[in-house]
Image (cartoon, rainbow, N blue to C red):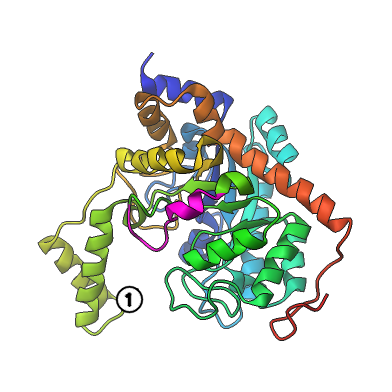
């Protein structure tokens, strides 16, 4: 049996729990949530990284759908609710394939039924509008993790890709973490500054996650996780879910992206410009300087290092499909997970270790968050703190 055949056999028993997929935002941007126009029961290779056929081919058994909204929206809360509505509509539209999941037990039930457990994660603390009441509302609607920031700071937490403002977490930021622990909502530390990672680990009494981040020692990008933070995951019980985004996993791609950004700024545009003029500048730059290509092996290098530092019990997978325009060769879409498992088998990873990576670790972490919630809720009621009165309860 080839390593790829072994990978497929393993994934039939222990499918992937993927920490982050941006399909809802892609549906918003491409077709304004017209699900007839992007029917994921049919092949969507021309438009998306994700459809049901490729999720099945990839051995995905549970998916955290990101209900991300841009941090520059004037009022992100309604947009976040629309994203949640999109996920709920997908689940209702495809009941033979998708099953709503709120708990670890729900994930196990979906696996037993042969359906894909569908959970939600909010990407960025701006989605709660500085309101713990909104945080509780998101939890009530099914959101089971929140990334504390996206690319920009929030008033109470520093992002990895913005100028530091509060030195990690403000007093209200610590209260957000405590309220998430009380609810049973996972604290997601992808996108946050290293100071924010350490501050959240100091405060959280529940396991934290990194829903889509890789190793900073392997690829020096601020979106990645420093070794000293990875070393703290065993004591916390949390996990780091390796991402596939080339500019976060391949150093040559980091350097290339920086040069491309410098080039577009030299033409009087921003790095995120998507106008026809900007695209022409980007294409001309790429013709002169071909884009470096990450591979399955690139991602496996991160997992090898992260296993050495944090241990195999604290690793998972968060591909970030439909949230990035570029993907590694061999991990082109959600059908590619068997290629990564095959690569790890070839590197000597055991079947038991791979089952932890794909299924058991993420299941354990959500179950532990639920247990902490029961304990904390027995002694602490809902917090009504605000940024202005951060310790008010």
Q: Residue reaching furthest top? A: 1
Query: For mark 1, what is the residue?
Result: 273
Q: Could you say which is closer to the camera, residue 17 or residue 283?
A: 17
- Residue 175 visible to an observer of this rendering: yes
- Location of residue 323 with respect to 74 vertically, above or below: above
Give the main secondary structure of the magenta stretch. loop
Q: Is residue 189 left or right of residue 388?
A: left
Quadrant (top left, top right, bottom left, bottom right) of the C terminus: bottom right
Q: Could you say which is closer to the camera, residue 132 or residue 238?
A: 238
Where is residue 47 shown, x and y percent of the image? 40, 53
Q: Could you say which is closer to the camera, residue 43 or residue 261?
A: 261
Q: Residue at x 40, y 50 (%)?
A: 215
- Residue 213 visible to an observer of this rendering: no
Secondary element type, mark 1: loop
Q: How many marks?
A: 1
Where is residue 107 shown, x and y percent of the image? 68, 38
Where is residue 325 shown, x and y percent of the image? 35, 58
Q: Residue at x 20, y 82 (%)?
A: 267
- Location of residue 280 with respect to 226 vertically, above or below: below
Q: Is residue 262 left or right of residue 214?
A: left
Q: Quadrant of residue 66?
A: bottom right
The answer to whether residue 225 is magenta is yes
The answer to whether residue 307 is magenta is no
Q: Could you say which is closer to the camera, residue 389 or residue 142?
A: 389
The stretch in magenta equals 219-232
Where is residue 326 shown, x and y percent of the image? 33, 54
């Amino acid at each position: 049996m080839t390593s790829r055949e072994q990978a497929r056999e393993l994934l039939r028993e222990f499918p992937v729990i993927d920490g982050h997929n941006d399909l809802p935002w892609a549906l918003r941007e491409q077709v304004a949530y017209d699900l007839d126009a992007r029917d994921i029961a049919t092949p969507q290779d021309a438009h998306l990284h994700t459809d049901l056929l490729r999720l099945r081919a990839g051995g995905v058994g549970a998916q955290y759908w990101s209900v991300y909204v841009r941090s520059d929206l004037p009022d992100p809360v309604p947009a976040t609710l629309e994203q949640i509505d999109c996920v709920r509509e997908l689940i209702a539209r495809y009941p033979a394939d998708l099953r709503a999941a709120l708990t670890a037990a729900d994930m196990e039930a979906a696996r037993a039924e042969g359906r894909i457990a569908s959970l939600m994660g909010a990407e960025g603390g701006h989605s709660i509008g500085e309101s713990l009441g909104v945080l509780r509302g998101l939890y009530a609607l099914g959101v089971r993790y929140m990334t504390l920031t996206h690319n920009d700071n929030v008033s109470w937490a520093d992002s990895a890709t913005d100028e530091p403002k509060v030195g990690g977490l403000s007093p209200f930021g610590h209260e957000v973490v405590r309220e998430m622990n009380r609810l049973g909502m996972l604290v997601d530390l992808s996108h946050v500054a290293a100071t924010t990672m350490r501050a959240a680990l100091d405060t959280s009494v529940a396991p934290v996650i990194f829903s889509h981040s890789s190793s900073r020692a392997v690829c020096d990008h601020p979106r990645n996780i420093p070794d000293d933070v990875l070393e703290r995951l065993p004591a916390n019980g949390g996990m780091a879910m390796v991402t596939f985004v080339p500019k976060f996993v391949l150093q040559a791609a980091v350097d290339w992206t920086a040069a491309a950004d410098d080039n577009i700024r030299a033409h009087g545009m921003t790095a995120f410009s998507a106008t026809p003029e900007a695209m022409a500048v980007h294409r001309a730059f790429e013709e002169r300087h071909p884009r470096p290509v990450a591979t399955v092996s690139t991602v496996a290098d991160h997992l090898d290092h992260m296993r050495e530092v944090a241990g195999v019990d604290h690793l998972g997978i968060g591909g970030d499909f439909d949230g990035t325009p570029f993907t590694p060769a061999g991990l082109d879409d959600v059908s590619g997970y068997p290629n990564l498992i095959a690569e790890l088998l070839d590197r000597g990873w055991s079947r038991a270790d791979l089952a932890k990576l794909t299924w058991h670790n993420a299941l354990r972490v959500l179950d532990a968050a639920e247990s902490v919630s029961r304990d904390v809720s027995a002694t602490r009621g809902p917090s009504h703190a605000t940024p202005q009165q951060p310790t008010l309860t």
